[in-house]
Image (cartoon, rainbow, N blue to C red):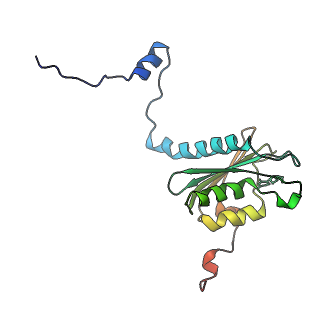
Amino acid sequence: MPCVRRRPLQSHAHRRSLARGIVPKRRRSAASQQWRPRMDLVSAATEVRARAYAPYSRFQVGAALLGASGAVHVGCNVENAAYPEGTCAEAGAIAAMIAAGETRIAAVAVIADSPRPVPPCGGCRQKLAEFADPDTPVTLATMAGARLETTVGALLPGAFRPDDMPDT
Ligand code: THU
């Protein structure tokens, strides 16, 4: 009989998990794949928030942007002894996105240890509007687990946009 080399039905990791009594997660449905990137975005924002440099306000903020390419770009607030020189988390994430060669935002998450889901400041709303569509989803979060789902357009209705300068 010819020796037919078959792929094992279960991978080594899968078999090891089963042996340990861990039941691997099933493949996600199409519907749950839609929320997954946005949950991951909050996780990415939470992770980068821990690296915020905020010795003056002691208010650490993390932001994560899902780029149109699928890449995630993160930023945290970076304060300065000359207070107005500090930069917001959203601005840092936008700078990282531009430095990575990407210019369109598909989704946004911002997190802070705030009593309500952290509202981006006015300047950051304008900065986000530059690279996103009005219906681009934004998740605002608290470290305690509260979430507010909104959009870039709802955060800054009537934003001044690049197409308001048709001759430039
Ligand atoms: N901050 C952000 O990073 N994003 C916002 O949208 C709100 C405020 C930062 C700026 C400053 O370092 C600290 O939070 C307190 O204002």
Classify the position of the N terminus by image quarter.
Answer: top left
Q: Is residue 122 above or below residue 45?
A: below
The reply to whether residue 134 is in sight is no
Q: Residue furthest left?
A: 1
- Viewer-proximal residue, 96 or 34? 96
- Viewer-proximal residue, 119 or 57? 57
Image coordinates of residue 93 in percent, x first then y, are 66, 54
Image coordinates of residue 97 in percent, x first then y, are 60, 57
Q: What residue is drawn where x is 75% and y is 38%?
A: 144
Q: Residue furthest bottom?
A: 167
- Viewer-proximal residue, 107 or 7? 7
Q: Is residue 84 left or right of residue 87?
A: right
Classify the position of the C terminus by image quarter.
Answer: bottom right
Q: Quadrant of ligand 1?
A: bottom right
Image coordinates of residue 61 in percent, x first then y, are 76, 48
The reply to whether residue 122 is in sight is yes
Q: What residue is drawn where x is 77% and y is 64%?
A: 122
Q: What residue is drawn where x is 43% and y is 34%?
A: 27
Q: Is residue 79 left or right of residue 167?
A: right
**Quadrant hosting residue 153:** bottom right
